[in-house]
Amino acid sequence: MSAVPGDITIGMDSATLSTRLAHRRSRIVRERIIELVLFLAALVSVFTTIGIVYILIKESVVFFQEVPFWDFLTDTQWTPLFSDAHFGIMVLLSGTLTSSVVALLVAIPLGTIIAIYLSEFAPFWVREVAKPFLELLGGVPTIVYGYFALLFVTPLLQKIYPGLPGFNLLSAGIVMGIMIIPYVSSISEDAMRAVPMSLREGSYAMGATRFQTAIKVVVPAAISGIASAYILGISRAVGETMILAVAAGQQPNLTFNPLEPAATITAYIVQVALGDLPHGSIGYQTIFAAGLTLMLFTLACNIGGHVLRKSFRETY
Amino acid sequence: MEYAKDLNEIRVLIRRHKRWDMVFGLCGLLALMIGVLTFVALFADMAVDGVPRLGWDFLTSFPSRKPQQAGILSAWVGSALVMLVTAFFAVPLGVASGIYLEEYAAKNWVTDIIEINITNLAGVPSIIYGLLALGLFVYTFGFGQSVLSAGLTLALLILPVVIVATREAIRSIPQGIREGAYALGATQWQVCKDHIVPYSMPGILTGIIIGMARAIGETAPVITIGALTFIAFLPAAPVQAEPPFLNFEWLLSGFTVMPIQMFNWTSRPEAAFLHNAAAAGFVLVLMTLGMNGLAIWLRYRLRKKIKW
Amino acid sequence: MVAVPSQEPASAIVKAEVKGLSFYYGDFNALKNISMPVYEKRVTALIGPSGCGKSTFLRSFNRMHDLYPGNRYEGEIRLYPDDINMLAPEVDPIEVRMRISMVFQKPNPFPKSIYENVAYGLRVRGESRRVALNEKVEDALRSSALWDEVKDRLEEPAFNLSGGQQQRLCIARALATDPEILLFDEPTSALDPIATASIEELIHDLRNKVTIVIVTHNMQQAARVSDYTAYMYLGELIEYGVTDEIFIKPKKKQTEDYITGRFG
């Protein structure tokens, strides 16, 4: 290296170079170990899924050794803890389905309208206030919603329909629907906002109003995202526990009439857990069989929703 | 059908369309109002029924068969302890997963499986987590119906929330910053530890707060693992005067949490217990609203502060 | 293509030599068999139209391509005096980056204080003694003509500086670690004309002190600032020589066409 007076000392002599190289191996080992630790942390989610699948199937297998599969699907009574035990999952499913339908009849229209309104109509400040508010609405603990359904909504409904029993699927369903609105509206709104402005401009340029543009251009363009929002809503409704355990009663009842009390799959599991069930008894296993049914349904919903959401992200 | 051709017909048509616009705008506001009204009614209901019951003795008494003497001491202590365990597991696992997926993971099938799993777990009903915990933590691992089982369960439940928040926060860091750090000879871990984690901290924190707010309010999974609904004792204190100063007995102790206490009181026919339930619910709503509000405010501050 | 300048200044020492360098992004052949010298403590400019591969070539020097999957090098870049091929898989890219620094097109200071930005490269090398850091930070900031402007506010966030100052900060950051080669990737294309002038003046001051390779799409800048110029087109090195010669009497017609603005 030429040594011109006054220049910045640069470069390395061979001693420094070899010290650097000596540290190299330990540095590489250290980096690899860190990467491994991080990788194992990321694997926890995979282990969780494996754990869920394993435990549900393990206990259900034992269950189905006792209870014929056909009976499980078609029996019209659910009385697992009686001496004359019946295990018809349809009973619990009817409660789940009825309450979910009520909830979705509330959540889907209102959620979609709110989403369209916030995405296409609302002035900036309304959006800035409404979005956090909806987030807060979705963050209220479900036990509080359950209390609200039992002790506020049901008496209110009883004023309109005096014959309404204290426990019923209707008020639970309505409150559940309101709880689900933020989920439906936020995903639908995201889907709508992802529609490029150029599409809207094309519509406006032809003299369309905001409403026409929203309904005829934006919603169809965002339809897969909106559909995935609905599917998420369905999944959420089916999986909800506390609102139903508190307000719909825990009495299994094969009915599709929301004005009656009934137990859902989830409420049944809670009821059993509250009692004292010996580990390994048939009653203990019923909750896993019920849980497996629930899991399969929500899995189907999640996969469907995921596929739809990917397709809306790829279009743009 | 003949469409409007002359100017007058067009004007009539436009007026009709604009009316639709206005109607829909009203519908939107109305729909929002339904949400607002529900929220206000809920909050007011809790407040009116519950606030009279609130007081120092309510916060410091154990549950009791007599509603006037019952309090939420065991419940909020239980909640606090469970939250400690939840945070202890969820935060490092969630942040580490997020860092791995954003900075280290290659685009291969292993990564795809991990990502699919996380998305899937986010949509699994919370009661299923309870079943997992019951079968696995309570019985197979033998942790019993304890604070530890509950904390682990809730940690797994909120893991997707923390992971997604971490990933979004990391993704918002511009590539130029990473390249600048690498160009100075930093290793991958140095870039993560000196740059990625510090710069994404606010976003990660927001996710942690939202996750914890969710965990505090969760009832179903904790009931399923068998949290007791009537306990008149507190788990042993974690710190003690004699060595070894830290006591871990509390991890394996029976316990209850706030939402379960509220559930228990709501299930009682006596009207007086319902006031207790409302009071507990009011405290719970304040806590979750406070935490969610904090997270929202943090996110707002973040958006204003860091201009990449 | 082997390039040899027609007139070699007597005191020029070769710091690095590119030998038959080819580079592939996946299947795309972005650099085709480039060979040229890089002289020590001189400024070498890489010019050419958009997409000619000059940035790709520059980023090969400090192995930036290793950060992204699917890239492949062929050929060598030998660094002297150790005569090691920097592109060899056995050579750790981290090491290469510790010896060769880079300044980027868009100033990218870290969201840290001015002091910490400059000190970061030193910290990565394990230097943590406050006194040593203070000294090197001051040296680096003086060398990049920023010291007087920031000496009273070293703890302030780097983001508070203007665009031109931020770029000088990035230069200081790169200088703090005494790099053997300093790479500039279009350092002024994101800056206004006044900031551009100050950066060019800085590069002028650094010449004869640091070995510099600079990519620029601005021909006048190359002519002003560099000792040697390499003209690239579509991944190939078309001509390399002493700057004055390239601009006044280029040997190849392609070079002449580019320089006279007939295209690009």
Image: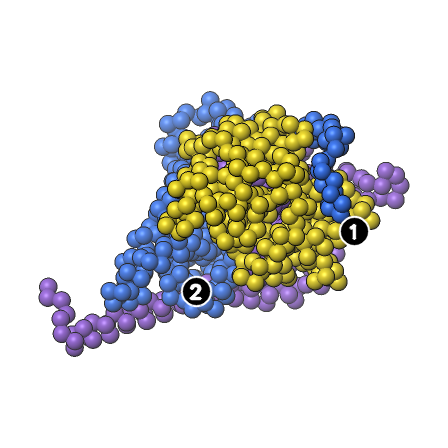
Chain colours: A blue, B purple, C yellow
> Which residue lies at the image location 71% right of the left edge and 36% below the top edge?
A1
Q: Nearer the viewer, residue A65 or C201?
A: C201
Q: Is residue C13 visible?
A: yes
* Residue B293: x %, y % from top left: 59, 60
Q: Nearer the viewer, residue B269 or C208?
A: C208
Residue named by callout 1: C134
Which element carries disc 1, helix, strand or loop? helix
Image position of C117 with respect to B133: above or below: below
Amino acid type, residue under disc 2 in the picture:
Leu
Q: Is residue B106 visible?
A: no
Q: Is residue C244 left or right of residue B282?
A: left
* Residue C259: x %, y % from top left: 43, 49
| Circle nearer the viewer, 1 or 2 | 1
> Which residue lies at the image location 45% right of the left edge and 43% below the top edge?
C250
**Quick one: label 2, few (<14), some, or many (20+) residues within 10 Å?**
many
* Residue B155: x %, y % from top left: 62, 41
